[in-house]
Image (cartoon, helix red, strand yellow):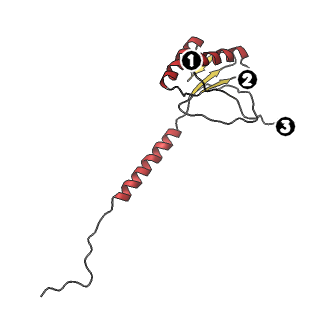
């Protein structure tokens, strides 16, 4: 006669579905963090102050800088106005919704900024903004 045990024997199981969910969560988290680590390369300019400035840099933006001498810079490369127009039109053909930020030095001439603005608008870009610095701290007497 064969007697069965009082407690039925349970078979060990490893559930892998929650492990797969955790791995996808970690993958997505690392991808989002790596996207936010991408920094744009641009030259340093002394921006004019603004009381309502907000910092907004994204990898898909075009950041164009105009230095105090009126030279135009894009990704640490000095460009002429026709070269700038070509670069902007090439990016615009790839993405018609590309935002452009123009940052000018405090000492940059208005004419140099206007030339850059006209070159960007001639390429067909609709989203053009001017970057400004944050409010200046009051100087101590």
- How many angstroms separate mark 2 from mark 3 (CA)? 22 Å
Question: Crowdedness of circle 3 by 10 Å Cα count: few (<14), some, many (20+)?
Answer: few
Tell whether 122 sits left or right of 23: right
Q: Which mark is residue 113?
A: none
Q: Residue 77: x, y in percent?
A: 56, 19
Q: Residue at x 50, y 19 (%)?
A: 90
Q: Which residue is mark 3?
A: 140
Is label 1 in a helix, a strand or a loop? loop
Q: Which mark is residue 106?
A: 2
Question: Crowdedness of circle 2 by 10 Å Cα count: few (<14), some, many (20+)?
Answer: some
Q: Residue furthest left?
A: 1
| Marks 3,1: beta carbons within 8 A | no
Judge by depth and name the residue closer to the eye, 95 or 30.
Answer: 95
Q: Quadrant of the N terminus?
A: bottom left
Q: Residue 33: x, y in percent?
A: 50, 43
Q: Residue at x 17, y 86 (%)?
A: 3
- How many angstroms separate mark 2 from mark 1 (CA)? 26 Å
Quarter holding residue 56: top right
| Marks 2,3: beta carbons within 8 A | no
Q: Residue at x 50, y 26 (%)?
A: 95
Q: Which residue is mark 1?
A: 123
Question: With respect to residue 33, does 40 lie above or below?
Answer: above
């Amino acid at each position: 006669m064969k007697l069965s045990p009082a407690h039925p024997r349970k078979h060990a199981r490893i559930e892998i579905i929650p492990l797969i969910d955790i791995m996808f969560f970690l993958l997505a988290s690392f991808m989002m963090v790596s996207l936010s680590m991408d920094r744009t390369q641009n030259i340093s300019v002394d921006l004019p102050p603004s009381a309502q400035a907000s910092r907004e840099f994204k990898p898909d933006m075009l950041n164009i800088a105009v230095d105090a001498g009126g030279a135009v810079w894009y990704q640490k490369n000095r460009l002429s106005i026709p070269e700038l127009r070509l670069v902007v039109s090439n990016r615009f053909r790839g993405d018609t919704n590309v935002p452009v930020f123009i940052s000018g030095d405090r000492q940059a001439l208005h004419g140099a900024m206007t030339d850059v603005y006209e070159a960007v608008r001639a390429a067909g870009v609709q989203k053009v903004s001017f970057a400004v610095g944050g409010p200046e701290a009051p100087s101590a007497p």
